[in-house]
Image: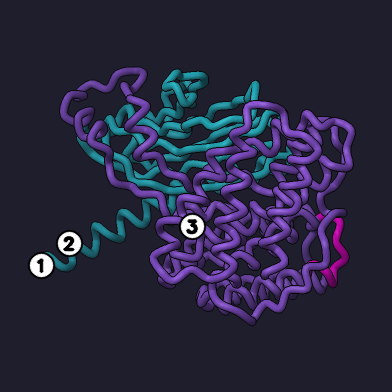
Amino acid sequence: MLRPRLRPHRLSLLALLAACAGTTPTPRDAEEEKVAPANPETPVLDIAGMEKGADQATLVPSPIETQRALEASGIETQLATLIPDHGFVMDKGDPDRAAIRTGVVLADLLLTTKTAKKEELVERLQQIAKGMEQLQGGADIQSTITDLVNRVQTDAVTRDELLKEFDELSGVMIPELEFNGQKRVVPLISAGSWLEGAHLVATALRNAEKKDAAEKLLKAPTVVDYFLKYVTTEGAAKAPEAVTMKLEESLKTLKALAEKPAPLTDVDLATVVQVTNDVLVLL
Amino acid sequence: MLLPIAFLAVNSALADETKAEACLRTKVWEGYADGWGVRSMVTTEIEDGRTRAYLVTLYEGNEYQMKACADERLVNADLLLYDTKGNVIARDSTVSREPELSFKPPATGTYYVVLYAREMTEAGGKGEVAVAVTYR
């Protein structure tokens, strides 16, 4: 189990988005507070208020959730089998790259938890540890990863248990980064995981016969929009790194495809593979 | 003596947050035995009669459960699922501080999970609630 001294205020995989989510009541909420001494069965909400004030910490699907949706679409391909050898050098480069890279490895770790060799799991955990070190994620997360590595190496934990613990690890990374003043990079970790998932799904769909599954799996404009807004607003508060600029460019293409009224074609799937890969190769 | 009072208040709030999170974590981790996974868990403070909305993208083909655990200051916490047009499409109907709702989306899309502090032990009070989105 993870150490209790971690601060799991938010457990959200890639969710990273949490960083941008506010807890400030909307004006509508304030009105409700004034006029609702006896609370109605169904709260009166207006959609504009929800759009404005909604927390986005729960917005982005996890890689395993995406794998299950792929299988539910009748495509048996295991995304884990499509993961390329990224060849990341985890302790090099700027924090933006480190964050996106860490998110990619985290997605790979989750997708391969049940099938990877022990040595591969250990290597990915150590890569995440290096990434988090570069992001100044704090000592607690390092201790947790060290503990996980030890237990994997000594077979002291089952793969089913590991899946839970990796889900929890991905979640506690967020509050740890926030606690250590690194909130800005949180959405970039999420973006890395989501980008890797989109890359693998598009690759699987290209090889599959059921192309219509692309409608269910790749048309998520709200998710793309979330990352795009981050990159062009909060993330733009500092001089953009090359990888962040490429990320913005790729997200714009993905947004156009996600909003395309017509079904996605083979060419569209090839485009998704290409633009996601354009970011991944810069890491 | 303001400082010790403030300290006690902060400690009390943290204890309530911990209780809510511990309750939810138990529920969520138990679900793994039945094939459930967790997308995210968040904790929030909420006032009597207020709502908190969470944006979610849900995949067609997957099954979802939203779960929450509130601390003892809440008598009845509700979870509702809204579509992006503002229609309630699923809700829990229990009088409980541990609401749950299940949903199988007819299409991949964006929804709002709304937490509603419908009744508290003290009118106008506030409490801590942990919320999770799980899937299988």
Could you say which chain is coloured purple in the image? A
Label drawn at residue A98 = none
SS of the residue under disc 1: loop
Q: What element carries label 3?
A: helix
Is residue A115 found inside the magenta-colored segment of the image? yes
Query: Could you tell whether A181 is left or right of A249 in the image?
Result: left
Residue beneath the point at 59% across and 26% down: B102
Q: Where is residue B70 in the image (x, y as percent from the top left)?
A: 41, 40
Disc 2 crowd rating (10 Å Cα; few below 14, some 14-19, many 20+) is few
Task: Name the amino acid, label 1.
Answer: Met
Q: Are marks 3 and 2 on the same chain?
A: no
Secondary element type, mark 2: helix
Give the extent of the magenta segment.
A114-122
Task: Say which mark, if any, is on residue A231.
Answer: 3
Q: What amino acid is labelled 2 in the image? A: Ile
Q: In this figure, which residue is indicated by the disc labeled 1?
A: B1
Res A224 quadrant in image: top right
Instruction: Reply above or below: B100 against A114.
Output: above
Distance (Cα) linking label 1 and label 3: 46 Å
What residue appears at the point 75 percent right and 50 percent down from the top-left corner? Answer: A273
Name the one closer to the observer, A223 or B87.
Answer: A223
Check disc 3: other Cα within 10 Å, few if <14, some if 14-19, many if 20+.
many
Q: Quarter of the image containing the N terminus of chain B?
A: bottom left
